[in-house]
Image (cartoon, rainbow, N blue to C red):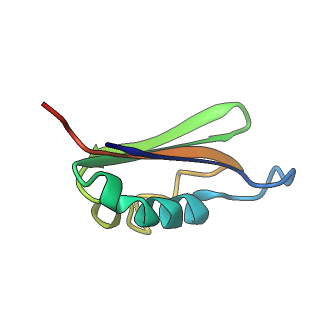
Amino acid sequence: MCGVIGLIKGSDPNGTCIQQLVDGLMMLQHRGQDATGIMTIKDNRMNLRKDIGTVSDVFTQESVKNLTGNVGIGHVRYPTA
């Protein structure tokens, strides 16, 4: 069981969607606590942050500085064997 969230934040090219993505992943945290990741897009460039751990461990204020853009997707992972 995993959780996925996607967001397109309006037509403002200078807008940012990272806070809404992190908030959404916090709401989906029960769907997976093994790993998490977010990718955003700005000016046809993809920005990625992923790591093992919970959403609050991986996405600190410092670690999301480069996740700019008004389009993004995020996930939380629950491993199965």
Residue 67 location (% of width, % of height): 55, 51
Front residue (pair 48, 77): 77
Query: Which residue corresponds to the image point at 56% horizontal and 43% vertical from the top-left?
Result: 73
The answer to which quarter of the image holds residue 60 is bottom left
Q: Is 39 displayed left or right of 80 in the figure?
A: right
Q: Is 26 displayed left or right of 72 in the figure?
A: left
Residue 50 location (% of width, % of height): 36, 44
Q: Residue furthest right?
A: 11
Q: Residue furthest left?
A: 81
State whether residue 80 is above or below residue 53.
above
Front residue (pair 23, 45): 23
State whether residue 18 is above or below residue 34.
below
The count of marks equals 0
The N terminus sits in image quarter: top left
Query: Which residue corresponds to the image point at 85% horizontal and 54% vertical from the top-left?
Result: 12
Residue 4 location (% of width, % of height): 48, 45
State whether residue 71 is above or below residue 55.
above
Front residue (pair 67, 37): 37
Query: Which residue corresponds to the image point at 58% horizontal and 34% vertical from the top-left?
Result: 46
Q: Is 48 displayed left or right of 40 in the figure?
A: left
The C terminus sits in image quarter: top left
State whether residue 61 is above or below residue 44.
below
Query: Which residue corresponds to the image point at 28% horizontal and 63% vertical from the top-left?
Result: 57
